[in-house]
Amino acid sequence: MYLVRPVDFGDLPALERLAQEAGIGMTNFPANRERLNDKIASSRRSLQTDVVQPGDESYLFVLVDTSTNTIVGTCGLEAMVGIDTPFYSYRIDEVVHASPQLQIHNRISALFLCHDYSGTSRLMSLVVDKAHQNATALALLSRARLLFIARHPERFTKRLFVELRGESDRHGYSPFWDALGKHFFTMDFKKADYLSGVSNKHFIADLMPRYPIYVPTLPEAAQEVIGVLHEDSAKSTDILLAEGFEFRGYVDIFDAGPTLEARSENLTTVSQQRIGKALIQPDSLLGKTHLISAGHLEDFRVTAAKAEPQAAGLAIEKDTQERLQISSGSRIQWVVL
């Protein structure tokens, strides 16, 4: 069985292991002990802060295999990006070049450096141990953060986005970076990705060309990966698409991985979640598997278990109650898995 809960300082070694396994391209989850420790501290501080509207808070959660009490995954949320420095992306758009005299009218795809997502909440850092990349674990971890957003809407913007990992190989070669980024820096993709993860992306954006990049002028290999998803992110991306996230023509400035966005109220988990009382039923349940959450902020917990909606609340088994650390009558939140 699995449980999602907020991260704690004792989880640092497990996060280091997951970051190493994630490899290159997970910019917001670097394999750097100091940076990961800072993420834990920021999450704990954010959960202890009274929030009226979103600011510089961030939240990090871990996926626990309760059978062994080991951490096998992590995911995070940023309440608002671009507060201190602009959050840069490439917007894919078209430029029209026309000559009435020659009767030529061309629409050329181009990349525009922008910070359209500044001031927006971001989903990030979804990493799961390869041995636990099953449908239940991935859905639980990904959708748990949406239940958290639904539970605490004042902490996030209505517009949400997530940057997905783009094409690169295990040696750190990115066709897009090789065609564009490396010409403005004296570093390869692996180093740029790491430096951005342990500091921030604005130092990269400061050196990127400000003028539109005409896509046809890039090598074919670079053109082919614009907006293309890394194969390791396919399963988690399917969950986001099923929730209602969409591609709106934005890509990452490093590897050109796609960015998905949505309005929180349009997401399946947010719109269909229910809140009520926990009804403890000792016998085995035959109901559907649900995502069930309980607790407030630091005590937030989410698990997946059989449950039966009833007029008075949600009937759950005793072991589910124990996993969530609740009792009969406790306030819980649920949605069908």
Image (tube, rainbow, N blue to C red):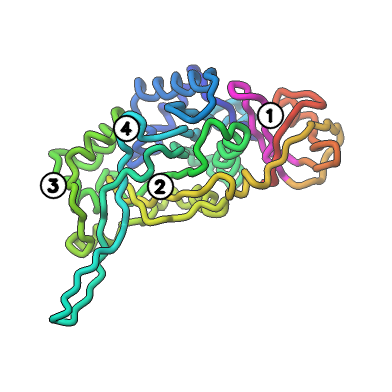
Disc with the residue nearer the chain's start (2 vs 3): 2
Q: Would you place residue 243 above or below residue 334 in this image?
A: below
Q: How many marks?
A: 4
Mark 1 → mark 4, Cα distance in angstroms: 32 Å
The residue drawn where x is 26% and y is 43% is 172
Question: Which residue has dot 4 on it?
Answer: 197
Contact, mark 1 vs mark 2 (Cβ under 8 Å): no
Of mark 3 and mark 4, the one earlier in the sequence is 3
Q: Residue 79, percent across and down?
A: 47, 32
Q: Secondary structure at mark 3?
A: helix
Q: Residues within 10 Å of mark 2 (few under 14, many from 20)?
A: many
Q: Residue at x 40, y 47 (%)?
A: 164
Q: Which residues are magenta?
A: 289-306
Q: Which residue is mark 2?
A: 164
| Quarter holding residue 2 | top right
Q: CA distance from mark 1 to mark 2?
A: 29 Å
Residue 149 against residue 330 in the figure, above or below: below
Give the labeled residue for mark 1.
294
Residue 29, image x, y percentages: 39, 33
**Percent x, y for residue 331?**
74, 28
Circle 4 sits in a helix, a strand or a loop, which is it? helix
Q: Which mark is residue 183?
A: 3
**Alpha carbons under labels 2 and 4: distance apart:** 15 Å
First in sequence, mark 2 or 4: give its number.
2
